[in-house]
Amino acid sequence: GFRLQLRPGDTAGQGSVLVFSSRRVLLDIQTDTVTTRQIRHDDHTELRLTANSLPPVELRLTVTPSLLADPIEITLPFPGTGCLGFDKKGDKLQSVLSFDDLLGSRLLLFAKPQAATWFVLELTLSGSLARHVYCRWSYQVINKPVEISLYNLREQIIDLMSLSGDIDQTVELRISSPGVGDKIYRIRQHSAELVLDRNRGLLATSGLNKINDAFPEPALMLLHDPHQRARLLVSRTSQGTDVGTYELPATLDRDGPWLVVPSTSDSLSFRPIFLPGN
């Protein structure tokens, strides 16, 4: 006899294919996106799968009964279950996001093997309003995983943030499913926060969701002459590495007012800072 069983792993990117066979067979899964480890048990062979990045929707399992027989190809769904988040580069999604991170980011919802699975997505505003104001969606996943673009949730996130007068708001995205567990992402307007230390004449990076060790690139813009080229502020370094602390020029009080803004559209976003100057 011959039969297959799918078993989900601890995360949506892991799982196993269990092969029960009364005779020895050759097994192979050909894919560059999944690492396969073959484990022999007393009554079956386990193909333990780990997705290197984005799990495939389907797997192709090749079964060869003998060296003289033709291989048999079987198409199987990936045995993951739960939710996986990916950024625009295909890397694992960070738990703290900014508006800039939403573009290209997505969630993949995986059903339990051979079972329809319900997922609930809920957006809430952190703080006292969280219990009363929310956006909620329900998804039923049966065979193929369901993909959700986070950028498509941007308008609802902005609407929730507008309900509070606080400058820096956080919206919580919770993905829940019975028997799977919750996954939570926190979304802010900006990637980083710059804090002004007036006594030391410094700007320091705070609450940064670091991506590839990147820091903001702040620049000084003269408000009464916005056509004048903005002056880039250079980060202090330690052993040749940026530390995310910026010295304000000593000539700051000779002119003004100033606005500290991101130097380019590609740099990490932060809330602009007003400096009165003279």
Image: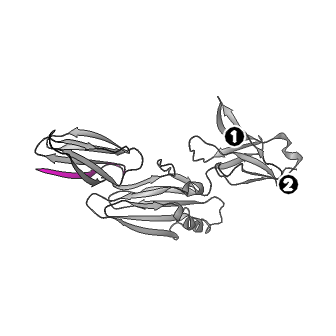
Secondary structure at numbered mark 2:
loop
Q: Is residue 78 within the magenta segment? A: no
> Relative to 234, is 186 on the left or the right?
left
Q: CA distance from mark 1 to mark 2?
A: 26 Å
Q: Residue furthest bottom?
A: 132
Q: Nearer the viewer, residue 153 or 197?
A: 153
Residue under numbered circle 2:
225
Question: In the image, residue 183 lies at what x, y percent?
Answer: 43, 56
Q: Is residue 13 within the magenta segment? A: yes
Magenta residues span 1-14
* Amino acid type, callout 1: Thr
Seen at 85% across and 51% down, the residue is: 256
> Relative to 193, is 16 on the left or the right?
left
Q: Nearer the viewer, residue 21 or 232?
A: 21
**Callout 1: few (<14), some (14-19), or many (20+) C-alpha neighbours within 10 Å?**
many
Secondary structure at numbered mark 1:
strand
Residue 15 disc label: none
Seen at 27% across and 62% down, the residue is: 115
Residue under numbered circle 1:
245
